[in-house]
Protein backbone atom coordinates (compact mmCIF):
# COMPACT_ATOMS: atom_id res chain seq x y z
CA UNK A 1 0.00 0.00 0.00
CA UNK A 2 1.22 3.47 -0.84
CA UNK A 3 1.19 6.27 1.70
CA UNK A 4 2.20 9.91 1.92
CA UNK A 5 3.53 12.06 4.75
CA UNK A 6 1.74 15.41 4.91
CA UNK A 7 1.13 18.24 7.32
CA UNK A 8 -1.62 18.07 9.93
CA UNK A 9 -4.73 19.65 8.41
CA UNK A 10 -7.73 21.31 10.10
CA UNK A 11 -10.03 18.65 8.66
CA UNK A 12 -8.05 15.89 10.46
CA UNK A 13 -9.65 16.52 13.87
CA UNK A 14 -12.45 13.96 13.43
CA UNK A 15 -9.98 11.26 12.36
CA UNK A 16 -7.82 11.94 15.42
CA UNK A 17 -10.86 11.54 17.68
CA UNK A 18 -11.81 8.27 15.99
CA UNK A 19 -8.30 6.80 16.07
CA UNK A 20 -7.34 7.92 19.58
CA UNK A 21 -10.50 6.43 21.03
CA UNK A 22 -9.11 3.05 19.92
CA UNK A 23 -7.55 1.78 23.17
CA UNK A 24 -4.88 -0.15 21.25
CA UNK A 25 -3.57 3.24 20.05
CA UNK A 26 -4.13 5.45 23.09
CA UNK A 27 -2.68 2.85 25.49
CA UNK A 28 0.63 2.91 23.58
CA UNK A 29 0.98 6.70 23.43
CA UNK A 30 2.33 8.61 26.39
CA UNK A 31 0.50 11.93 26.14
CA UNK A 32 -2.79 10.95 24.52
CA UNK A 33 -5.72 11.03 26.95
CA UNK A 34 -8.55 8.52 26.88
CA UNK A 35 -11.28 9.19 26.05
CA UNK A 36 -10.08 11.59 23.36
CA UNK A 37 -12.45 14.46 22.61
CA UNK A 38 -13.06 17.02 19.86
CA UNK A 39 -11.50 19.64 22.16
CA UNK A 40 -8.32 17.55 22.41
CA UNK A 41 -8.21 17.19 18.62
CA UNK A 42 -8.86 20.89 18.00
CA UNK A 43 -6.02 21.79 20.38
CA UNK A 44 -3.64 19.33 18.67
CA UNK A 45 -4.43 20.50 15.12
CA UNK A 46 -3.86 24.12 16.17
CA UNK A 47 -0.65 23.27 18.06
CA UNK A 48 0.78 21.21 15.18
CA UNK A 49 0.32 24.17 12.84
CA UNK A 50 1.47 27.05 15.07
CA UNK A 51 4.91 27.37 13.48
CA UNK A 52 6.62 26.22 10.29
CA UNK A 53 8.96 24.07 12.43
CA UNK A 54 6.07 22.18 14.05
CA UNK A 55 4.47 21.72 10.64
CA UNK A 56 7.71 20.09 9.41
CA UNK A 57 8.23 17.92 12.50
CA UNK A 58 4.67 16.59 12.91
CA UNK A 59 3.48 14.55 9.95
CA UNK A 60 0.30 12.67 9.18
CA UNK A 61 0.48 9.35 7.39
CA UNK A 62 -2.20 9.25 4.70
CA UNK A 63 -3.48 6.21 2.86
CA UNK A 64 -4.17 5.85 -0.87
CA UNK A 65 -7.28 8.03 -0.80
CA UNK A 66 -5.78 10.71 1.45
CA UNK A 67 -7.35 9.50 4.69
CA UNK A 68 -5.43 9.93 7.95
CA UNK A 69 -4.20 6.47 8.99
CA UNK A 70 -1.37 7.38 11.36
CA UNK A 71 1.20 9.95 12.31
CA UNK A 72 4.85 10.46 13.17
CA UNK A 73 6.58 13.38 14.79
CA UNK A 74 9.29 14.75 17.02
CA UNK A 75 8.20 14.44 20.65
CA UNK A 76 11.27 15.91 22.37
CA UNK A 77 12.00 19.60 22.81
CA UNK A 78 13.31 20.61 19.41
CA UNK A 79 14.11 24.00 17.90
CA UNK A 80 15.66 22.69 14.68
CA UNK A 81 19.30 23.01 15.76
CA UNK A 82 19.69 20.02 18.09
CA UNK A 83 21.83 17.06 17.10
CA UNK A 84 19.18 14.61 18.34
CA UNK A 85 15.43 14.18 18.20
CA UNK A 86 13.05 11.74 19.85
CA UNK A 87 10.21 10.48 17.67
CA UNK A 88 6.80 9.05 18.40
CA UNK A 89 4.38 7.40 15.99
CA UNK A 90 1.17 5.44 15.66
CA UNK A 91 -0.78 3.64 12.95
CA UNK A 92 -4.43 2.67 12.67
CA UNK A 93 -4.93 -1.00 13.55
CA UNK A 94 -6.38 -1.84 10.12
CA UNK A 95 -3.12 -0.76 8.40
CA UNK A 96 -0.67 -2.59 10.65
CA UNK A 97 1.41 -5.45 9.28
CA UNK A 98 1.69 -3.92 5.80
CA UNK A 99 5.16 -2.39 6.19
CA UNK A 100 3.84 1.18 6.20
CA UNK A 101 5.17 2.32 9.56
CA UNK A 102 8.72 1.04 9.05
CA UNK A 103 8.95 2.93 5.76
CA UNK A 104 7.35 6.05 7.25
CA UNK A 105 9.88 6.03 10.11
CA UNK A 106 12.72 5.64 7.62
CA UNK A 107 11.39 8.50 5.45
CA UNK A 108 10.87 10.74 8.48
CA UNK A 109 14.40 10.06 9.77
CA UNK A 110 15.82 10.89 6.34
CA UNK A 111 13.97 14.22 6.49
CA UNK A 112 15.40 14.96 9.96
CA UNK A 113 18.91 14.03 8.81
CA UNK A 114 18.82 16.09 5.62
CA UNK A 115 16.70 19.14 6.52
CA UNK A 116 17.98 19.69 10.05
CA UNK A 117 21.25 19.21 11.93
CA UNK A 118 20.00 15.97 13.44
CA UNK A 119 22.60 13.23 13.80
CA UNK A 120 20.75 10.89 16.19
CA UNK A 121 17.08 9.93 16.14
CA UNK A 122 15.76 7.90 19.05
CA UNK A 123 12.52 6.39 20.30
CA UNK A 124 11.47 5.07 23.70
CA UNK A 125 8.54 2.70 23.17
CA UNK A 126 6.97 1.00 26.16
CA UNK A 127 8.66 -2.30 27.06
CA UNK A 128 5.32 -4.08 26.62
CA UNK A 129 4.95 -2.81 23.02
CA UNK A 130 6.93 -5.51 21.19
CA UNK A 131 5.35 -4.62 17.83
CA UNK A 132 6.91 -1.16 18.07
CA UNK A 133 10.29 -2.73 18.86
CA UNK A 134 10.12 -4.86 15.71
CA UNK A 135 9.15 -1.86 13.56
CA UNK A 136 12.09 0.19 14.83
CA UNK A 137 14.51 -2.67 14.21
CA UNK A 138 13.19 -3.08 10.66
CA UNK A 139 13.71 0.68 10.17
CA UNK A 140 17.39 0.30 11.07
CA UNK A 141 17.29 1.34 14.73
CA UNK A 142 19.52 -0.35 17.30
CA UNK A 143 18.35 -1.35 20.76
CA UNK A 144 20.40 0.40 23.43
CA UNK A 145 18.75 -0.98 26.55
CA UNK A 146 15.82 -0.94 28.94
CA UNK A 147 15.10 2.09 31.09
CA UNK A 148 13.09 1.23 34.19
CA UNK A 149 10.16 3.52 35.11
CA UNK A 150 11.16 5.80 32.21
CA UNK A 151 7.66 7.02 31.40
CA UNK A 152 4.75 7.98 33.63
CA UNK A 153 1.23 7.86 32.22
CA UNK A 154 -1.51 8.76 34.67
CA UNK A 155 -0.37 6.97 37.85
CA UNK A 156 1.54 4.17 36.10
CA UNK A 157 5.32 4.05 35.79
CA UNK A 158 6.23 2.33 32.53
CA UNK A 159 9.50 0.71 31.49
CA UNK A 160 10.80 1.73 28.07
CA UNK A 161 13.25 0.35 25.54
CA UNK A 162 15.63 2.90 24.07
CA UNK A 163 16.28 2.61 20.33
CA UNK A 164 18.39 4.89 18.17
CA UNK A 165 19.52 5.45 14.63
CA UNK A 166 22.38 7.70 13.56
CA UNK A 167 23.03 9.54 10.34
CA UNK A 168 25.79 7.24 9.11
CA UNK A 169 26.72 9.58 6.25
CA UNK A 170 28.09 12.10 8.77
CA UNK A 171 29.51 9.70 11.34
CA UNK A 172 32.97 10.39 12.72
CA UNK A 173 34.44 6.99 13.55
Image (cartoon, grey):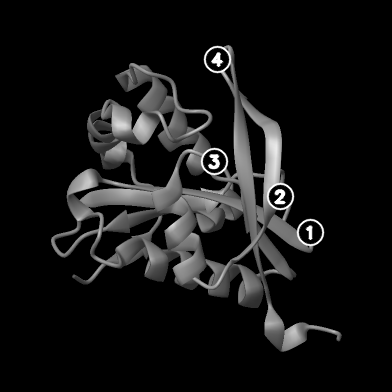
Q: Residue at x 33, y 40 (%)?
A: 10
Q: Distance between the residues labelled 2 and 1?
A: 7 Å
Q: Residue at x 31, y 21 (%)?
A: 38
Q: Distance between the residues labelled 3 and 2?
A: 25 Å
Precedes in sequence: disc 3 or disc 2:
2
Residue to which mark 3 is pinned:
127
Q: Mark number for residue 82?
A: 1
How far across and down, in percent of the image, does residue 101 sit? 36, 61
Question: 30 left or right of 149?
Answer: left
Q: Is mark 3 on a helix, strand or loop?
A: loop
Q: In the figure, 115 relative to 152: above or below?
A: below
Q: Residue 75: in sight, yes or no? A: yes
> Farthest left residue?
65
Question: 51 left or right of 18?
Answer: right
Q: Distance between the residues labelled 1 and 3?
A: 26 Å
Q: How far apart are marks 1 and 4 (CA)?
A: 29 Å
Q: In the figure, 42 relative to 120: above or below?
A: above
Q: Is mark 1 on a helix, strand or loop?
A: loop
Which one is in front in this view, the residue at disc 1 or the one at disc 4? 4
Residue to which mark 4 is pinned:
154
Quadrant where the image shows the N terminus: bottom left
Q: How far apart are marks 4 and 2 (CA)?
A: 24 Å
Q: In the figure, 153 relative to 145: above or below?
A: above
Whether label 2 touches label 1, CB < 8 Å = yes
Q: Mark number for residue 114?
A: none
Whether label 1 touches label 4, CB < 8 Å = no
Precedes in sequence: disc 3 or disc 4:
3
Q: Residue 20: in sight, yes or no? A: no
Precedes in sequence: disc 4 or disc 2:
2
Residue to which mark 2 is pinned:
78
Q: Which residue is drawn at 34% across and 21% down?
A: 36
Quadrant where the image shows the C terminus: bottom right
Amino acid sequence: MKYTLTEVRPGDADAYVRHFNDKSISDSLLRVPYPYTQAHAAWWVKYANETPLRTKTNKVIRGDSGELIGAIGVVSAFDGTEHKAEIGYWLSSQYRGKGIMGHAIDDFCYMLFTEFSVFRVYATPFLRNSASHRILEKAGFSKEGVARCYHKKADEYIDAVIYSKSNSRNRNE
